[in-house]
Image (cartoon, rainbow, N blue to C red):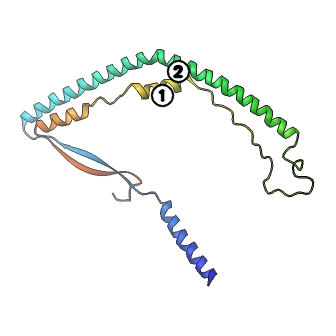
Amino acid sequence: MLPALRSMILGIVAVGLVGCASPSPRYQSVYRYEPPADSAGQVCLEKCGQKMEGCQQRCTADYQVCLAGIEPLVEGRYGEALKRYAAELDRYRWELERYQLYLSLSWHDSFWYGHGFYHPWPGPYYFPPAAPKKPSRAEEFDRLRKERCELECGCQPIYDACFLACGGKLIPEVKCIADCPEGK
């Protein structure tokens, strides 16, 4: 009875894991833009497009100003990161010396337990230290850019409001964006 129960449980677990292995589709809500049919609405939409373009140009200009403004901060943060790296490198060298000493003295052998003593933990007990990662100026720049310079300026909601005011329609749709079932 016990082997049958065990095989049944293993079968259920296997079926559950197979279900987890196949990725599920991912969906995203989007809007379909349906423009107005009359000529006055089309002229209005051209103005909306011009507003959108102006907003995006201002956004790009603000982004460039922000990038220029963070340059001095990047140098400061990069200098601090280099100091931290130097300290971590000194610590790594110290730990590496201790690790080499540990291996050379064979402290992981029968010294602590006596000859013929079985210990279940395979040696070495003391693992080699991990080397620190050297910082780069580009990483510091990217980190500051993400913190300080926001690329999203809110132009799309303004355009959407203008589009609706001109007589257009925004129709919400749900679209599959990843791992979509075939035929959809």
User: Dot 1: what SS?
Assistant: helix
**The N terminus is located in which quarter?**
bottom right
Question: Is residue 148 shown left or right of residue 86?
Answer: left
- Residue 17 sits above or below residue 171 on the image: below
Please tell me how crowded label 1 is: few (under 14), some (14-19), or many (20+) other residues with Cα within 10 Å: few
Q: State the residue in front, 17 or 6.
A: 6
How far from the left and from the top, in percent, is residue 76? 52, 17
Tell me the residue at 66%/31% (across/down).
Answer: 132
Please provide percent x and percent y for residue 114. Answer: 91, 52
Q: Residue furthest right?
A: 115
SS label for mark 2: helix
Asked if the residue under mark 2 is in contact with the one under mark 1, i.e. CB atoms within 8 Å, the reply is yes
- Check disc 2 and give the amino acid type: Arg
Give the CA distance from mark 1 to mark 2. Answer: 10 Å
- Choose top left, top right, bottom left or bottom right for residue 129: top right
Question: 156 above or below 63?
Answer: below
Q: Identify the residue position indicated by label 2 in the image.
A: 77
Total labels: the figure holds 2
Q: Quadrant of the C terminus?
A: bottom left
Q: Give the percent coordinates (x, y) of residue 144.
A: 46, 25
The structure residue drawn at horizontal position 40% and vertical position 25%, both measured from the top left corner, is 148
Q: Quadrant of residue 49?
A: top left
Q: Identify the disc placed on residue 143.
A: 1
- Numbered label attached to residue 108: none
